[in-house]
Amino acid sequence: MSEGQELVHVRVRVNGQPYEADVEPRTLLIDMLRDNLGITGPHIGCDTGHCGACTVILNGRSVKSCMVLAVQADGSEILTVEGLEKDGQLHPLQEAFWENHALQCGYCTPGQLMSAYFLLGRNPNPSEDEIRKAIEGNLCRCTGYVNIVKAIKAAALKMSSPRAG
Amino acid sequence: MSKASPELISLYTQDSAALTLKWLGKPLKPKEDHRLVRGRGAFVDDVQLPRMAYAAFLRSPYGHARIKGMDISRAKSMPGVLLVWTGDDIKKRMRPLPQATPPPARNAIDYPLAVDKVRFQGEPVAMVVAESRYLAEDAANQIDVDYEPLPAVMDAEKALEPGSPLVHEEVGSNMIAHVHYKWGDVDYYFQHADMVVDAKFHYHRFTGAPIEPNAVVADYDERLDVMTVYCNNQAPMEWLPQLSAGLNMPYPKLRVVTRDIGGAFGTKLINYVYMVLASLASKELRRPVKYVETRTENLQAAAHNAERTCYVSAAVQRDGTVLAIRMKCIDDDGAYSRHEPAGMTVWAQVSTGLYRIKALENDFYAVFTNKCPSTSIRGFSRAPHLFMIERIMDRIARKLGVDPAEIRMRNLVRPEDMPYMTPSGGLYDSGNWPDGLKKALEAADYQGWRRKQEELRRQGRYVGIGVVVGSDSAGPNMAQVKMYNPGLPYTSGTEGALVQMTPDGKVRVTLGTSPQGMGHETTAAQVVADVLDVDYDDIYVQTGFDSFTSIYTMHSGTYGSRFAPLGLSAVYLAAARLKAKLAKIAAYMLRCNELDVVLDGGKAFCRTDPQRAVDFKRIARVAYGNVNEMPPGMEPGLYSIAIFRPPFQNPDENRRANLALTYSYNVHVVVVEVDPETGMPRILNYVALEDSGRIVNPLVVDGQVHGAIAHGIAEALYEKYNYDENGNLLNSNFVDYLVPTALEIPPLSVVHTETPSPFTPTGAKGMGEGGGTAVQAVISAIEDALSPLGAELVDSHADPETILRILKGSSR
C-alpha cells in the first residue's frame, strides 16, 4: 500500500536538458520518463526486465529503465533515443538502422539503438558475436535480428572511418 | 488437381497497364523508419490526454471456477479510484459479444468480464479505473473473490468424451464445430494405392508475443457525442459492430484510430474486448480511459494459437506419387470463440500442400477447453495444415527410402499446370515451384551437406537436414467462414484506398489497413509513385487507420498477408484513376489529343510537341482553384477512391471455393546439429527461397522473411505454452516463455525467384507469415539428425528434454 506516501522531488538531465518531477518513491524510471517528462521514445514491453525496450543510458551505463526507481536516478544524466540526433543529423546508428531496415514495427528500436550505442562506445569494432551478445537483452519479434546486426556493423564501420564526424 | 479453366483464369486476371515499373522493386528507405529510429513512433501508450484515467484488471487465478461472491467495497473506497466494475455491471450495460459459431456453440455467453464463472486463468473478473495506473492496480488487488474451483477441461480429445466437465453449460457439450468434407474420390484412391502411410501429429500452443502489448485509449467527447478509440487492433473495422453494439452508438459517431502498432502477429485481433470496456468506462466517467496490458497479462490472457492434434493418412504409389490425403484434426480453441474456429477450415484447402494430390478428406473438430482463447497467430491455419502435409511427406520419403527433397520434387505442382486448381477449389496463381526447389537446394549446397552429414555421422555426430516447401495463401476470401457456418453474412475480401493529389501537387494517400511494421506507407508510396511517376518523397501516406478519414470496408485491416494482394491493388486502382484524370486535364490545358498526353517525372507533355508541357502542381491548382481552366463539365478536385474486389465466390454446394487471392511459395533448407550432451539443437545453415510475386520493396520482403523464420525457429525450439491439469499456465512471462534473443537466431540467407501473380495488378503476392515453413523445416531437420536412432517426432516443438529422451532411448 502506498497511499499517503510522500512524493519525492527528482531532478535529472535528459538528453542535456534539465527536468524535475514529483514522484512516488515506487515510481519506475521508465514511468517517470514517459508519464511525467513526456519522453516517450523508450517503451515498455514487459514487467520483468527482459525485453529491453526501455533501455536508456544512465550516467554512461546502459540500464533497463523499468529496473531502476526514479528516485535512484535523482541527479543523474540520462540519454534516450531522442538524444542521439545532433543538430537535426541522425546518429550513424540511426542512419544505419534506416538504411538496413533494421526495424519493422519500431517498438524495440529505441532500446536496440541505446544498447548498440553503449556497445560502440566501449568497443568501436565489435565482431558479430560481440554485437549479438551486446543486444542479447533487447528482444525483437520482427526482424530475427538479421538486419539489426548488419546495421550495427555498418554503423561501427562508418564511425571508425576517418571521415566520420 | 488440374490446370484451372480458361474462363476462371480470365475472370481472375488483372490489368496492370498503368504500371511504369520505374519505382517498383527498388530498396527505397522505408518511410516509417525515419520517425521510428528517432523514437518518434506514435504508439497507443504514447497517447496522453488531459484528465486521462487508467484501467487495471483483476484476473482469475483459476482455469475453471464458479464465482460465488465478490467484495469490491475496499477497492471502491480507495482514494483516487473512480470506478470498479464486475461482470454484473457489464451485463447491465451491454449484450454478450456476438458469436460467429454455428449452433449450439452459438449459445455460449461471452462477456468481456467474467459473469458467474471463470473459464481460463487470466480471464478478467473486475475492472478498476483510477487516477493513475499504480492506483488502479493497487485497488484491483483489494478486491476479494470467493471462487469454487471446478474440474478443468484441458485435453481437447477428452473434452469430447461424454461426461466431460463443460466449459459452457449453455452449449451442452464442448464442441464448437465439426465439419467433414470429401473432395475427389478419396475412398477409391485409398483402396487402390500401393500403400497407405499413417501418422499422428501435434501442433503445439504458442503465441506471437509482440513487444508492444494490447493497449487502448478511449476518449468520449460529450460535446460532439463522439467516441474516439485509439487502439492497436489489426482490423478495427471487423470489430466495429461489437463496439457499436456495446456502446449503443452508430458508426458515424465512433472514431477508431490506429497509428504505429508495436507488432501483432495475429494476437491483436481479439483485443476488442478492451476497446469495449475502456469505451464504456470513458462514457460513464466522461473522461479518457487508458489501458495497457502487462506482459504477464499479455502472455496469459491475450491470445494463443489453436493447438491441434491430427491423424493423417496418405495414399501413396510406389514411385512416391501421393494420390490422396485424409486428415482428422481436433483443434483446442480455448475458452471462448472470439476468432476461432476459423482456423480449422479457413485454409484447409492447403492441406494438400503444394502438391498435385487428387483427393482430400477433412474431418475437423473444434473444441472448447479451459485455456486462453485462440486466434490467428502468424502463419494462421496454413501453418498447422502445412505442418501435417510436410511431416507426412517426410514419413513417406523415409518409408520409400527416397530423399525428402526428391519426394517433394515428384509431387510439386508443375509450372505448366498453373494457375492450378486444388481438389477443394483453391486457385494457385503462379510460380515455377520445382525450379524454386532446385534453386534452394543449390543455394544451400544440399548435396554437399548430405555428404558432410554422412561423414559426421560416422564420427558419431547428430547432423540433420530439413527440406520443406510452403506457402502464404494470402488475401483471404472471408466466405471461408461459411465452411463451418453457412449462415454467416460475411464474404469476399476487399480493401480500400484514397489517393489524392492535393492543391500543392503533392500526393496524399490513406489506407484501410492497420500495419504493424510491414511498411505499408513505403510500398503504397512506391505503387503510387510508379503509376503516377512522381517522386517517392512527394507522396505522403497517412500513418495507420482512422475510421473518420480512411476508406474502408468491413474486411479492412492487416491480417492474412492481405496488403500486397488486396491493399496495394486498391492503391493501384485509385492511382490509375487519378492518372487518367490528370491526363484529361492536361490534354485540355495543352490543347493536345488525350491519347498523346504523356505523364513523366511529375509533369505532362504532348507527345507530338514535347515543348507543350505542364507540371502536376499547375494541374492541381487548376483542379482545385482555377476551375474555369478545367475541361467543361469535369468535376473539380483530384480525389480518387478505389475499393479492390477480387472475383471471389462463396463455397459451392460441395464446399469448393478459392479462399485466397495469391499463393506465394517458399522453400527452407536447414541444417542442424544436436548436442548429445545437452539435447540442444544448433542451426548450422539456414537458406530460405521466397517467391512472393513481384517484389515491391526488397528491404520489406526480406525483413518479413527473416521475421517469419525467427518465429518459426522460436516455435520449434523455444516457445511453447505449458498448462498443468488444473488450468494453471506455467510460463506467462519472458523468464519462462522463451522468446529468442540475438544469440539464438542464427544468420539467415534469403534467395528469391520472382513470378508475378497474374491475379493482382502489381503482380505482388501476399507474404510475410511464412506459412509455418520454418517450424516444419527445423523439426524435419532434427528428426533427420536423430534418424539413426529411428526417432520420429510427433510434435511441432522439440525442446532439449524431448531430444534427450530420444537420445537416451527412452522415448519408445
Image (spheres, grey):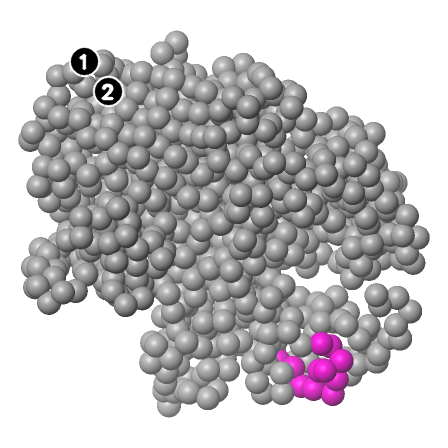
State the residue at coordinates (84%, 65%): A1
Q: Is residue B364 in view from this perspective?
A: yes
Disc number placed over residue B188 in the picture, else none: 1
Amino acid of disc 2: Ala
- To the question of a shared chain for discs 1 and 2, the answer is yes
Chain identifier of the residue bearing label 1 in the image: B
Residue B83, relative to residue A27: is it above or below? above
Picture mark count = 2
Quadrant of the rendered structure where residue B488 is? top right
Chain identifier of the residue bearing label 2 in the image: B
Q: Is residue B504 in view from this perspective?
A: no
Report the span colored magenta: A69-79
Residue B764, relative to residue B36: is it above or below? above
State the residue at coordinates (46%, 73%): A135
Residue B316, relative to residue A119: is it above or below? above
Q: Earlier in the sequence, mark 1 or mark 2?
A: 1
* Residues at marks 1 and 2 touching, judged by CB atoms closer than 8 Å: yes
> Residue B664, position in %: x, y?
31, 39
Residue to which mark 2 is pinned: B359
Secondary structure at numbered mark 2: strand
Given this view, does label 1 or label 2 mark the residue nearer the observer?
1
Residue closest to the eye, A112 or A102? A112
> Residue B743, position in %: x, y?
38, 69
Q: Is residue A22 magenta?
A: no
> Residue B450, position in %: x, y?
10, 56
